Amino acid sequence: MVDVTAKQPTVRTATARGFVRCSTDVIAALRDGTMPKGDVLAVARIAGIQAAKSTPALLPLAHVIGVHRASVDLEIVDDGVRIEATVGTADRTGVEMEALTAVSVTALAVVDMIKGMDRAVVIEDVRIVAKSGGRSGDWVRPGEASPGETHADGDAR
């Protein structure tokens, strides 16, 4: 584990995104609210927020930090569910792993809720899209819209 004792706490955020690709039947049921297991998006959102707070229990060398903000947004689109998680802290190390964990577990919760209707469901493209704070400052993945923004074609990517 990296020693961060001497580092000064700073405000830090990280945003991650991912995608769950699923069948048109699942998309229709998600939009209609007729999924057999219930409200998929609500369950997945809570799972992702809980996961962000539990990251050090899942990743052996992750620091225990105060997660002061965790939001998970899901959007149903024609070929699946887009996921975006933003995590914030005022601590000595960043929250990239917490944001990635939030997206990953959110996606797993979606899969768990829909697998009875679509055994071919796929989790895709989990990645950090932006971070701020800390020694290295701000960063946005090239080609990505900033967190919460969309491209001209309406795609949050």
Image (cartoon, rainbow, N blue to C red):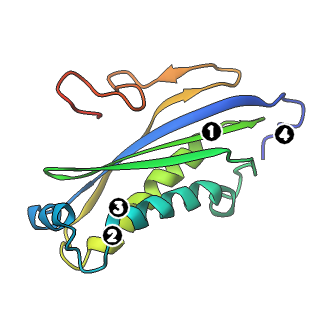
Q: Residues within 10 Å of mark 1 (few under 14, many from 20)?
A: many
Quarter of the image for the C terminus: give it: top left
Q: Nearer the viewer, mark 4 or mark 2?
A: 2
Name the quadrant containing residue 22. Answer: bottom left
Q: Earlier in the sequence, mark 1 or mark 2?
A: 2
How many angstroms separate mark 4 from mark 1 (CA)?
A: 21 Å
Q: Residue furthest front?
A: 32
Closer to us: 104 or 31 = 31
Q: Is residue 117 left or right of residue 126?
A: left
Name which of mark 3 and mark 1 comes first in the sequence.
3
Label placed on residue 41:
3
Q: Is residue 133 left or right of residue 1?
A: left
- Is 57 situated above or below 86? below
The disc label shown at residue 3, or none: 4
* Real-space Cα separation, disc 3 to disc 1, in angstroms: 22 Å
Asked whether the residues under the numbered discs 2 and 3 touch, taking CB atoms below 8 Å apart as contact, a structural biologist would say yes
Identify the residue shown where x is 71% and y is 52%.
Answer: 61
**Secondary structure beneath disc 1?**
strand
Q: Is residue 126 visible?
A: no
- Give the residue displayed 19% in from the left and 68% down from the top: 120
Which residue position holds label 2?
39
